[in-house]
Amino acid sequence: MHTYITRPAKILIEIGFDRACSMHAEDDGGLLLPLHNTADSLTLQVHSMPSSIQSWTGGRPISNDTDDYIFFLSKDAELYGCFSNAYHERSGGHLGLHSKDGPFWCVNQELHYRKAILFGDEEVANLILAERDDAAKIKKFGREVHFYDDNKWTEVRYDVARDAVESKFRSDDKLKKMLVETEGKIIVEAATDRAWGIGLVEFCSTSDEGEAKKGAKNGDNCWEVHPSEWSGLNLLGRCLMDVRERLLRE
């Protein structure tokens, strides 16, 4: 017997909110696939969640006001481009938060390096470390990790990414200031990726061929798809908000 989570149910798993959210993967119908650790011998207790809270916020209440959100995507954007995992850190990069290895010039480099090390693929790990400028190549190497186990990676990826993001912003006072100054805002990666992003781009658009592309907002900066209907987990946005809160507590 499997335990399933549907979006309307909005339930919280007692194995920990962060871990539970990072283990979900929605299908196109909005139904979350079964958690990989769920089995007949494992009992999960669930509690109702307020309708104003979504998994992609990391337990934070959502807002109906578009001005309460910070959308980011491109590493080259003048504003908030530094929130991208592919952003080239100009301070010389960051070291591992706990291991102090590196330096890593972008979060994606550390993320895929940790993945390769986790599965014992030192050859790919070295290729990732040797790449000093091309985030796309790093992503390609990360997909070539031998003995990769998606269930195992899914269990740890959020913590790995959050540590990398924290080290990145602690290593550069300018970046740290920019993140802290977003206090109170909900940070979301406007990517169609439904793990790291919200599953949507920021604005609706139409291609040169006339094909419509749905976005979170329309041209009037009003919701086209309300946040309560976003299908992505927004793992990167949550990492940024978690790190921001840690920095604000200091």
Image (cartoon, rainbow, N blue to C red):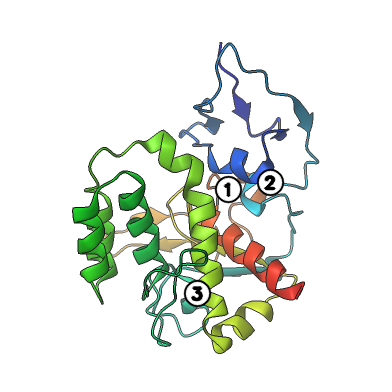
Give the label, 1 or 3, closer to the camera.
3
Q: Secondary structure at mark 2?
A: loop
Residue 230: x and y, percent? 58, 48
The residue type indicated by label 1 comes to: Trp
**Residue highlighted by disc 1:** 230
Looking at the picture, does residue 8 appear above or below residue 185? above
Q: Residue 154, which numbered label?
A: none
Q: What is the spatial separation of the Cα atoms under label 1 and label 2, in whole angstroms?
A: 9 Å
Q: Secondary structure at mark 1?
A: loop
Marks 1 and 3, the one that precedes in the sequence: 3
Q: Nearer the viewer, residue 116 or 141?
A: 116
| Identity of the residue drawn at 30% across and 39% down | 148
| Identity of the residue drawn at 49% across and 55% down | 160
Q: Nearer the viewer, residue 22 or 124?
A: 124
| Identity of the residue drawn at 48% across and 54% down | 196
Give the label, 2 or 3, closer to the camera.
3
**Residue highlighted by disc 2:** 54
